[in-house]
Image: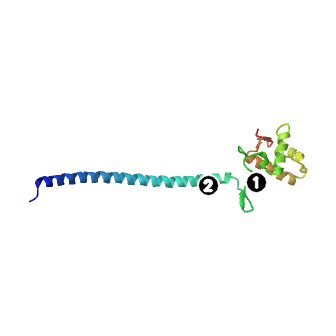
């Protein structure tokens, strides 16, 4: 015959374990739900990061290749990037703009740096360099088309 006290203890322990099992099952369901939410958040973050990278890609200048390494010939103006890091002809252009009494047209810069301003085909590459310096933050272009230093 079985001891009634032992049967009672077994029944009580079984009830405790059943209650614990319910709590753990509920906790497991909550953990799985949160894990699923995190997976969705991660996918959304990856998608948005990719979209932002695509949106910003056209704005970022494409570096050139020198000896198989990527280099940017005209770097962005940032703290620690000196004017001396620019190619020599760009340094001359910035100097010409800086030495002018005020904002200057591309033709005036061309006269200072020695470009034949009477030939439009020779003036356009200079204008392109001026615009590149504006895009990289070295110069500023005014609404009337004249250029000035950013300082």
Q: Is residue 48 left or right of residue 148?
A: left
* Front: mark 2 or 1: 1
Reading the image, the residue beneath label 2 is 54
Residue at the bottom extreme, as displayed: 68
Which quarter of the rendering shows the N terminus? Answer: bottom left
- Total numbered badges shown on the rendered structure: 2
Reading the image, the residue beneath label 1 is 73
How far apart marks 2 and 1 lie (CA) works out to: 23 Å
Of the image marks 2 and 1, the number of the one nearer the N terminus: 2
Q: Is residue 125 left or right of residue 36?
A: right
Residue at 62% x, 55% y is 54
Residue 97 picture location, percent across and down: 83, 42
Residue at 70% x, 53% y is 61
Place residue 70 in its image quadrant.
bottom right
Residue at 58% x, 55% y is 50
Residue at 38% x, 52% y is 31
- What secondary structure is found at the residue carrying circle 1? loop
């Amino acid at each position: 015959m079985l001891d009634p006290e032992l049967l009672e203890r077994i029944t009580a322990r079984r009830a405790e374990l059943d209650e614990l099992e319910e709590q753990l099952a509920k906790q497991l369901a909550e953990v799985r739900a949160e894990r699923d939410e995190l997976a969705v958040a991660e996918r959304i973050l990856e998608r948005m990061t990719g979209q932002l990278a695509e949106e910003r890609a056209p704005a970022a200048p494409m570096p050139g290749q020198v000896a198989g390494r990527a280099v940017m010939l005209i770097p962005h103006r940032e703290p620690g990037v000196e004017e001396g890091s620019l190619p020599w002809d760009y340094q001359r252009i910035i100097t010409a703009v800086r030495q002018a009494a005020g904002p200057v047209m591309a033709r005036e810069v061309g006269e200072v740096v020695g470009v034949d301003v009477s030939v439009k085909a020779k003036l356009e590459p200079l204008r392109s360099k001026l615009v590149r310096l504006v895009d990289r933050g070295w110069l500023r272009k005014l609404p009337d088309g004249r250029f000035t230093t950013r300082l």
